[in-house]
Image (cartoon, rainbow, N blue to C red):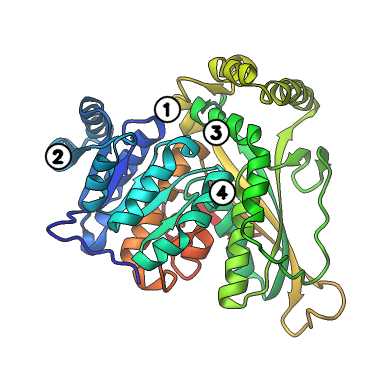
Amino acid sequence: MARVETSSSRPYHLVIFGASGFTGQFVVEEVARTASEGPKGTLKWAVAGRSKQKLEKVVEQAAGVLSKPELRTEVDIIVADVEEPDSLAAMCKQAVIVLNCVGPYRFFGEAVVKACVENGAHHIDISGEPQFLEGMQLNYNSQAADKGVYVIGSCGFDSIPADMGVLYTRDQFKGTLTAVESFLTVSAGPDGASIHDGTWQSAIYGLADKQKLQSLRRKFNHKPLPTVGSKLKRRGALFFSNEIQQYTLPFMGTDPSVVKRTQRFLAEEQHATPVQYGAYAGIGGIGNVFKLMFAGMIFWFLVKFSFGRNLLIKHPEFFSFGFFTKAGPSRKQMEDSAFQFAFYGEGYTDGADPSQGKPNGKIRTLVRGPEAGYVATPIAMVQAALTMLNESTALPKKGGVYTPGAAFVNTTLVNRLNKHGFQFSVI
């Protein structure tokens, strides 16, 4: 069972590390907004990062946005730097949970995970980088288990909606669910949408290091998961989806990797039937197809060379047609944006024998939410932390490195998200 109590030596339920970063500032606001949902209606929290001045500014900003002047005196500030292990250790010793917002995680994440595991703090991140997430599982799972520390990755838009969405679909299906495909669509208002270039950088380094991810995966020596029912066919690289009525690509993010790790955990630890998963994202009409193909060819070419990567990093707006920007989206853009996952599942209804014939039942569910990167992500991250604090007995029996689905399968996380702007529903 997770240790989640504060003490005189560990005074904070939550410490937000990287609080003055682009995403971190919105996590600060979300924690301040939901502090009354902490254990016994209270939450003791602090912000942490390299610059005391920037952290003070972020707390001041949150106090203004939320009309909570008390934040200026109630929220403590901890100076900590990934380049200074002693400062990370001192921060982790004071926290029950560290909310780590410092990316790209491939460069800055491991030092924080290491400090958390060694100093008894649980760790939640919002990484969308499979190489980092799976590397942490390989290198820290047994040590975290020994210490009773929970390291839970990808607790933002990557990959709580997909991972918990598959589990929600499984739980709503009356029988044995065997396969699910998800289709992501994103909508924006009149001002359009944009993403901060930190995500762009993670994508650049992730694609450049694809070979390393494959060799990392071989080190796990995993046996293939058993296939129950019809084998899920992979769709093409570009196709028109009848499900969402637009051109569609395989989803390039973390979701397939995270969902597969969750299904492996549930199959091995709880003897559940593993659900096959395919993830796709809608890109719209034919004009978007040509635009994406053009940008994609340039991206794939440049990402292979260090000079190309430097160009991509230096000019995100140019190479992404303005979608990735150094300034990130405006608050108006965030208010007007939303996402939707449509899940199409199949399986064997109650009474049908999964070892005989093809699946005979279907289900369709939706997971809807607000703007993905800086509204939905902070909500998901903070609700994951509050679930840990309030439902520690429902977490896996021992510490370790977990996906959201593995960690929260027996909790009320979906219900909590439904009260905070998400909507999980059966069609």
Mark 4 near mark 3, Cβ–Cβ under 8 Å? Answer: no
User: At which x and y percent is residue 4?
Assistant: 28, 64
Q: In this orientation, does residue 380 appear?
A: yes
The amino acid on which the numbered mark 4 sits, given as a three-letter code, is Arg
The amino acid on which the numbered mark 3 sits, given as a three-letter code, is Ser
Per the model, the C-alpha gap separating discs 3 and 2 is: 36 Å
| Label disc, if present, on residue 202 of the rendered structure | 3
User: At which x and y percent is residue 180?
Assistant: 71, 60
Point out the tag, 4 or 1, that comes first from the N-terminus.
1
* Closer to the camera in the image, 208 or 296: 208
SS for dot 4? strand
| Label disc, if present, on residue 70 of the rendered structure | 2
| Label disc, if present, on residue 368 of the rendered structure | 4
Mark 4 near mark 1, Cβ–Cβ under 8 Å? Answer: no
User: At which x and y percent is residue 163?
Assistant: 57, 56
Residue at 83%, 67% in the rendered image: 230
SS for dot 2? loop
Residue at 42%, 56% in the rendered image: 151
The residue at which mark 1 appears reads as 331
Classify residue 300 as left or right of residue 399: right
Give the number of the mark in front: 3 or 2: 3
In the figure, 351 relative to 262: above or below? below
SS for dot 3? helix
Question: Which image quarter is the N terminus in?
Answer: bottom left
Point out the tag, 3 or 2, that comes first from the N-terminus.
2
SS for dot 1? helix
